[in-house]
């Protein structure tokens, strides 16, 4: 069953600025879908349309089976939303905000209180539930925001850049919670500019650029489209004329700087690392550094658009293996 | 409907709580009008001896309406400021993403403004009683004055909300602050219109705030009179009607712009 179905979705702002230009996508029930793209690509505009905060100027979108333009109230009953820059009232306590959210979703008072109690504990804020939100750290605010989005047990959860600006441990805590929610059956649609986030969490990724969908698929399939992993080899001695010949046995070789640095595409993937090391050793070539570099979603983006994703601060070029010798 | 009323109540309670938690919200509502009342009563008390000044028990009795009006108008401005801050913070988006009717967001804010208007009226009545003022309308008169305080704040709150919704900026709403005093000075809130010079006298004659002032002042200085109450309600209807139309327009503009 489809949780989100989007056909030709468009949004044009005053002055003719087209933020979203005909997006098509479908998200299955129980899926985690990551919407990846650089700043200004149209991610937030798309989420705002899917959450009924912004009216589309073209196309159609169904969320939980309801049209976002014609049945906005029905959509809002089925979704949870945690928007960018967790918009929380700094004068209220975490628990008060949870209870307010429960009331806004029509939960009876006792039920709202029960869920607020459970959710503040679930997102790890039980110890700070009576403190004013103004005293919370960025990570605590995001966790509270996430908890508030869950108070009415939504079918579809929208997270707009849920970890932007967070430290690694806070980011990991949000990821764990998203995975847990998804395990419980909640469909998650998240936007992110972090490659690692999309890679770690998403069942499928849609990459958006300039308001258009550039490419869509599972992270593994997208990366496979870009190519095989390659090995960065750095030798200790310069001018090794025969190093290129040794490495060429394993795949296409791109010679690097001054005869010491080479890149070889591994046709056999990571399984070729040991044979490469043995072959270099047998040829009397000493290895200074060896890095296995897997294709990243940034490579996918680069291949599709000719540009790198901006704003990514992660170790996007995932180094699965790094060996160094004297 | 019941769910909407609960939502209005919850949003109103939030606004009231925040007003009391943040002195910068509450201070202007009570401090400025109280100072004005003290200065006016102390410095211009002899005005009651002027020819044409209505028969009153004391100048403080006459000035209570001015204090209540001023505090109610400032409560409206602070309510609008709070709404604009919610827009600036993005909190309004959270409310818009909830399954409540859009006007509920504004009505919640206005419910709080109504309560704060009543609170301001109680504050000034308490000051009045402490310094020897009497309410000729008795207990019912006190209730009328308190209700008028709440309704005045709500009526002006509609206009402040409209400005908040249209601008989405707290500083723009706070820009209304000096305007509050101008509106009051060209009404019969502080002095009888008959004692004003032209063109203030004519402006005060047509200013609906003068009607509201009559509605609040009547139970204090003259007792309960239908004509005063009707004048007050007419003034509130004019201001409230304008506020309703403007805030509906502001809400529509905000939803289109979001």
Image (tube, rainbow, N blue to C red):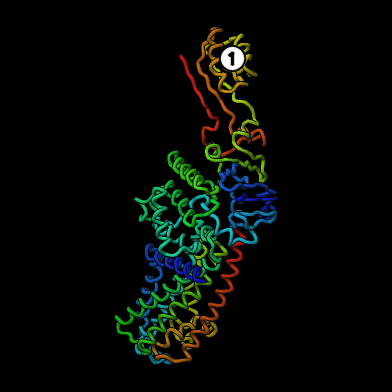
Residue found 48% across the figure and 86% down from its top: B193
Q: Is residue A106 above or below residue A307?
A: below
Q: Position of residue B232 (x, y in %)?
A: 48, 84
Instruction: Give the structural element (helix, strand or loop) at label 1.
Output: helix
Which chain does tag 1 point to? A
Residue found 55% across the figure and 47% down from its top: A188
Residue B129 falls in which quadrant of the image?
bottom left
Q: Is residue B222 above or below residue B2?
A: below
Residue B248 falls in which quadrant of the image?
bottom right
Residue ranking furthest to the front: A1
Which residue lies under the disc numbered 1?
A258
Q: Residues within 10 Å of mark 1 (few under 14, many from 20)?
A: few
Count of residue discs: 1
State the quadrant of the C terminus of chain B. bottom right
Q: Position of residue A86 (x, y in %)?
A: 48, 51
Q: Is residue B58 visible?
A: yes
Q: Position of residue B227 (x, y in %)?
A: 48, 91
State the residue in front, B113 or A99.
A99
State the residue in front, B197 or A145.
A145
Q: Is residue B178 visible?
A: no
Residue found 39% across the figure and 78% down from its top: B121
Q: Position of residue A26 (x, y in %)?
A: 64, 47
B60 sits left or right of B177 in the view: left
Residue found 46% across the figure and 52% down from its top: A145
Residue B225 falls in which quadrant of the image?
bottom left
A167 sits left or right of A267 in the view: left
State the residue in front, A111 or A200.
A111
């Amino acid at each position: 069953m489809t949780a989100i179905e989007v056909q030709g979705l468009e949004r044009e702002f005053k002055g003719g600025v087209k933020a979203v230009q005909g997006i098509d996508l479908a998200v299955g029930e129980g899926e985690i879908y990551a919407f990846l793209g650089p700043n200004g690509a149209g991610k937030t505009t798309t989420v705002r349309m899917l959450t009924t905060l912004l009216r589309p100027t073209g196309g159609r979108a169904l969320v939980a089976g309801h049209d976002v333009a014609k049945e906005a109230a029905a959509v809002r009953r089925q979704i949870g939303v945690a928007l960018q820059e967790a918009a929380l009232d700094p004068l209220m306590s975490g628990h008060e905000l949870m209870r307010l959210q429960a009331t806004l979703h029509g939960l009876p008072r006792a039920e709202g209180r029960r869920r607020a109690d459970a959710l503040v504990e679930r997102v790890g804020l039980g110890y700070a539930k009576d403190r004013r939100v103004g005293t919370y750290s960025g990570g605590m605010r995001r966790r509270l925001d996430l908890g508030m989005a869950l108070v009415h047990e939504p079918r579809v959860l929208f997270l707009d850049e849920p970890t932007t600006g967070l430290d690694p441990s806070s980011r990991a805590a949000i990821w764990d919670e998203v995975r847990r929610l998804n395990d419980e059956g909640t469909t998650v649609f998240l936007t992110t500019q972090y490659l690692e986030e999309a890679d770690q969490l998403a069942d499928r990724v849609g990459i958006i650029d300039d308001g258009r969908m550039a490419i869509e698929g599972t992270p593994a399939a997208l990366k496979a489209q870009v190519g095989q992993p390659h090995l960065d080899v750095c030798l200790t001695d310069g001018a090794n004329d025969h190093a290129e010949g040794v490495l060429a046995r394993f795949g296409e070789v791109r010679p690097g700087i001054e005869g010491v640095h080479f890149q070889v595409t591994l046709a056999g993937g990571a399984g070729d690392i040991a044979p490469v090391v043995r072959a270099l050793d047998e040829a009397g070539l000493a290895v200074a550094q060896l890095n296995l570099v897997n294709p990243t979603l940034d490579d996918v983006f680069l291949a599709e658009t000719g540009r790198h994703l901006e704003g990514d601060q992660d170790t996007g070029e995932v180094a699965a293996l790094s060996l160094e010798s004297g | 409907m019941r769910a909407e009323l609960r939502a209005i109540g919850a949003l109103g309670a939030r606004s009231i709580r925040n007003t009391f938690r943040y002195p910068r919200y509450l201070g202007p509502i009570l401090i400025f009008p109280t100072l004005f009342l003290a200065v006016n009563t102390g410095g211009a008390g002899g005005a009651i001896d002027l020819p044409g000044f209505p028969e009153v028990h004391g100048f403080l009795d006459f000035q209570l309406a001015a204090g209540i009006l001023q505090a109610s108008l400032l409560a409206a401005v602070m309510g609008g400021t709070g709404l604009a801050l919610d827009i600036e913070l993005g909190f309004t988006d959270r409310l818009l993403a909830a399954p409540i009717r859009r006007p509920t967001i504004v009505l919640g804010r206005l419910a709080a403004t109504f309560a704060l208007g009543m609170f301001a009226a109680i504050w000034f009545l308490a000051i009045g009683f402490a310094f020897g003022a009497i309410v000729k309308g008795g207990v019912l008169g006190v209730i009328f004055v308190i209700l008028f305080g709440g309704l005045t704040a709500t009526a002006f709150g509609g206009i402040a909300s409209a400005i908040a919704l249209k601008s989405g900026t707290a500083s723009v709403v706070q820009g209304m602050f000096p305007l509050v005093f101008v509106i009051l000075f060209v009404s019969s809130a502080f002095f009888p219109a008959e004692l004003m010079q032209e063109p203030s006298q004519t402006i005060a004659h047509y200013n609906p705030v003068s009607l509201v002032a009559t509605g609040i002042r009547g139970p204090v200085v003259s007792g309960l009179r239908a004509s005063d109450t009707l004048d007050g309600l007419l003034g509130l209807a004019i201001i409230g009607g304008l506020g309703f139309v403007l805030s509906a327009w502001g809400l529509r503009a905000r939803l289109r712009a979001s």
